[in-house]
Amino acid sequence: MNKFANTTLATREPSTLFGQPRGLATLFFTEMWERFTYYGMRAILILFMVSTVSGGGLGIDDTTASSIYGLFVACSYLLAPLGGWIADTLIGAQRAVLAGGVLIMVGNAMLASGTPQVFFLGLVLITFGVGMLKPNISALVSHLYPEGGSRRDAGFSLFYMGINVGALLGALLVPICAARYGWHWGFALSAIGMSFGIVQFMLTRHHLSAADLTSPVNARLRSWLPVVVFVSATAIAALLAITGAITIHPKAVAIAASWLIGVLAAGCFAYLLFFAGLSAAERKRVYVMMAFFVASTMYYAGQEQTGTSLTLFAERYTDRDLWGWVMPAGMLQGVSSVFIILFAPLFSALWLGLERRGRDFSAPVKIAAGLVLMGLGFLVMYVASTYVVAGHKVLPTWLVLCYLVQMWGDLCLAPVGLSSMTKLAAPKLVGQVMGLWFLSMALGDNLAGQLATQYDAANLASLPALFLKMFEWGAFSGAALLLLTPGLKRLMAGVK
């Protein structure tokens, strides 16, 4: 019999697995399947949109497809603050994760339908689902480590490895499925993956903390009004677009969305500073969150080129013939996940080892290193693109080297940023602060789509120019954050 069988939820001690809370495995596998779905779909998304109609695609030009792609991934994270607020205020984090998973599964099933109208509606549903699931599953991870410290950093690093196991499987299997059976079967496989994640979460969620299990549902109709208004407005806009009553210009919408996200982020930070009832020390930490928000935005504007300019580079300018088998271009996205899986345990051990010796780097230094390494990856691609301009196809090893350097940067920035935001946030606002972190990803992803439009297939000289700009983007922003580090450490007020 379970030794906790006669103990109440409020008092029982959490079980452990390999020294980590057992609930981490629940969240690890839920996130793994969600990322399988997301990155599998992402591996073929822009290629499907630019593929000719006769080839089963949508026949969209590069500029429009890049704008749609950037807008889609941005909206996936733009809704994260709303998802965090819904969890904190209305239904709790667990129910938000479940609702998000169902929306993601249904949205991917709609991508597989074959009709453009249903396809774009499916993208809308996925954005809602990711916005519900992503901030709240990260908040659930933080609840497993109430003591904070480097143990939480290590837990998030392991959780981040789960993200990349799913991303690797999705980036490998979905493109192969799409290449062999057609685009729509690739999207269908993504939907199946999310269904596995939902079932796994339902069967093992009892391992999460007692507070997560007992969060009530807010039944007051007034509290639900913002959600009802937002969903209704989105549904009306989608209906008008599908029926042709309004015409949407993706590039113009993407530019407007960047401004909207920036204004929304400023409003969220203003709320935290002046209206959230924070103490003086907690308000100082908000300024650190703002610096990390900007750094994250800069990083993901570069990192999300993986799904746009770098995938188009893989499709058009790399020699992918392996002993008579042409590797699908989308599979190269999986290389990033291989490096995360290989190096995440090493980075996790590195942070713990440095802390034991009293030499751990501060969070701002780690994040700055992530930005610089992201930029250096694009310096590799700048060199590769000069060969392309000279009329040669290049080996995929250029992309592999680029992804290796960038994933070292990713391990410095992404898990540390996630962990740091949960430490800096007031306990009552963790879900909303995690929503802000994902809002930075939304802004960065949308900027990535806009930056990718600077690549013109008819003018190959635009390719090295884009990669050189991305190198400068990462190097200069990383250097700026390093200069700000002493002041940020003072504002962190003891948070490690």
Image: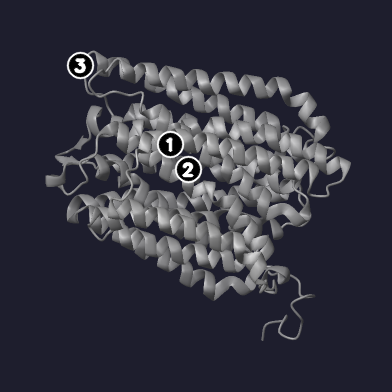
Q: Residue at x 76, y 75 (%)?
A: 12
Whether residue 173 is visible to the viewer of this picture, yes or no, is: no
Q: Quadrant of residue 144?
A: bottom right
Instruction: Give residue 453's position: percent from left, percent from top.
Output: 35, 28
Marks 3/2: CA–CA distance: 34 Å
Q: Residue at x 48, y 49 (%)?
A: 76
Q: Earlier in the sequence, mark 3 or mark 2?
A: 2
> Dot 3: what SS?
loop
Instruction: Give residue 81's position: percent from left, percent from top.
Output: 61, 51
* Residue highlighted by disc 1: 254
- Per the rendering, the mark at residue 391 is 3
Q: Looking at the picture, does residue 481 appear above or below residue 25?
A: above
Residue type beneath disc 2? Ala
Q: Quadrant of the N terminus?
A: bottom right
Residue type beneath disc 3? Gly
* Residue highlighted by disc 2: 74
Report whether 247 appears left or right of 277.
left
Depth order, front residue of 360/114: 114
Instruction: Give residue 78's position: percent from left, percent from top.
Output: 53, 46
Report whether 240 appears left or right of 114.
right
Q: Looking at the picture, does residue 321 appear above or below residue 27?
A: above
> Dot 1: what SS?
helix
Mark 3 nearby-residue class (10 Å; few <14, some 14–19, many ≥20): few
Q: Earlier in the sequence, mark 3 or mark 1?
A: 1
Mark 1 nearby-residue class (10 Å; few <14, some 14–19, many ≥20): many
Marks 2/1: CA–CA distance: 9 Å
- Per the rendering, the mark at residue 136 is none
Q: Residue at x 61, y 49 (%)?
A: 435
Q: Quadrant of residue 398?
A: top left
Q: Are the residues tagged 2 and 1 within 8 Å (C-beta)? A: yes
Q: Residue at x 84, y 38 (%)?
A: 493
